[in-house]
Image (spheres, helix red, strand yellow):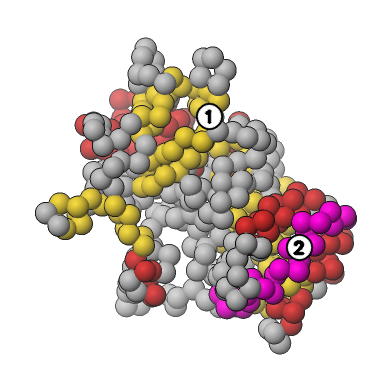
Amino acid sequence: MQFSRAVSAAVFILTAACAPLGGVIGEKPADELRLARTSFAKLESWAAADPKAALAAFAASCKRLVKRKDGDAFGGVAAYGTVGEWRAACEAALQSPGNARQFFEAWFEPVFASNRGEEVGLFTGYYEPELTGSRTATGKFTTPLYTRPSDLISVDLGAFRPALKGERIAGRVDDAKLVPYATRGQIVSSGLSGRSNAIAYVDDATGAFFLQIQGSGRVKFANGEVIRVAYDGQNGHPYTAVGRVLVERGEVRREDMSMQRIRSWLLANPAKADALMNENASFVFFKEQPIADPVLGAEGAQSVSLTPEASLAVDLKFHGLGAPMWIDATAPVESGADVVFRRLVVAQDTGGAIRGPVRGDVYWGAGKRAEEIAGRMAHKGRLAVLLPKAVAARLN
């Protein structure tokens, strides 16, 4: 895929993933990334950090970056410079750079990111669910994980109008017109016969629902084989947060809401579960991928395998894929109070709900621990981008 998910593990609970295409009178000013130079000494806990995982993730990104032309824009806003201005740091990262912290200090300068001067933003988490499945529909394995339908058309609106960069719609062609695709409810009830195949059938409809939220996951078969199902398109309908629906109905208190709370409600109310999940018209399609390294995740938007706790999804309107970033926030643990989360990560992915200059979605890995943390992460924090020194110097 691009591992671009419908939404992050936490944000899907109470917010919609799709932003409006046009402005509305009276709405807040448009987001604007502002960058202010700082120093590593002003990044709290940097001196004690060991960004070894981030260096490995950065090197993986560099394998993609060095194949691009020097004059290409790095990505994000113009302040990120060109690929050529990142090349020396990338080449150094690919040649046994030694101590990770010293490497970043030698090649980069941190700059604080803000949204029109507001430095505090939102950080959430995502993960790879693990499900049990079968290649055929049999017994308890009845919920299909569909491939991309042959009649699904995806349109990048930015290719038609620059102001719509990052916006996409999807549908199907009917009488030479693009019309909306089937909703989640229609697909679940009627299937996609002749237009899509099922990669696998799983025994957990609720788990399949959360798999669609995350956009990628793993399926284990009875013979021990494990495959990855990765995002390969979406039906084009806007996302409706089922957590918000539960809050509005008075089923769950807002302060108690989490991904785990939604799962508990669905399991406790089987007669109402399908109707609630169908409140969200969005539906995600998958492609099968082998798992080369069980530690790493699926490929993100940069076509680089994601590194647990070192890969970040960002808004590509503002940030470039491959950029190292320092997060200063808090994060959940499996049990107990939140802990300080100060970590160097690398922008390697994006997602439908990842909107804004100070906004990030941390990839936590696969399995129950990752699910527990990602499902409860919705924490405020600050973001510093690491730019090559010559690029950062132009910010004066």
Which residue is the site of mark 2?
91
Three-letter amino acid code at the position of disc 2 = Glu
Three-letter amino acid code at the position of disc 1 = Ile
Which residue is the site of mark 1?
227
Is 81 magenta? The answer is yes
Depth order, front residue of 294/92: 92
Q: Residues within 10 Å of mark 2 (few under 14, many from 20)?
A: some
Residue 160: percent from left, percent from top: 33, 71
Write down the region rendered in magenta: 77-101
Depth order, front residue of 240/299: 299
- The kind of secondary structure element at disc 1 is strand
Q: Magenta span: helix, strand or loop, mainly?
A: helix
Residue 32: percent from left, percent from top: 52, 76
- Give whichever of discs 2 and 1 has the lower sequence position: 2
Q: Quadrant of residue 86?
A: bottom right
Residue 104: percent from left, percent from top: 80, 63
How many marks do you count on the picture?
A: 2
Residue 238: percent from left, percent from top: 33, 53
In the rendered view, tell whether residue 157 sits above or below residue 396.
Answer: above
In the rendered view, tell whether residue 259 sits above or below residue 271.
Answer: below
Which residue occupies 37% across, 19% down? Answer: 136
Q: Give the farthest residue toward the bottom.
A: 396
In the rendered view, tell whether residue 26 sits above or below residue 334.
Answer: below
- Residue 259, numbered label: none
Q: Quadrant of residue 385?
A: bottom right
Depth order, front residue of 270/249: 270
- Looking at the image, residue 54 sits to the left or right of residue 189; the answer is right
The answer to whether residue 152 of the structure is visible from this angle is yes
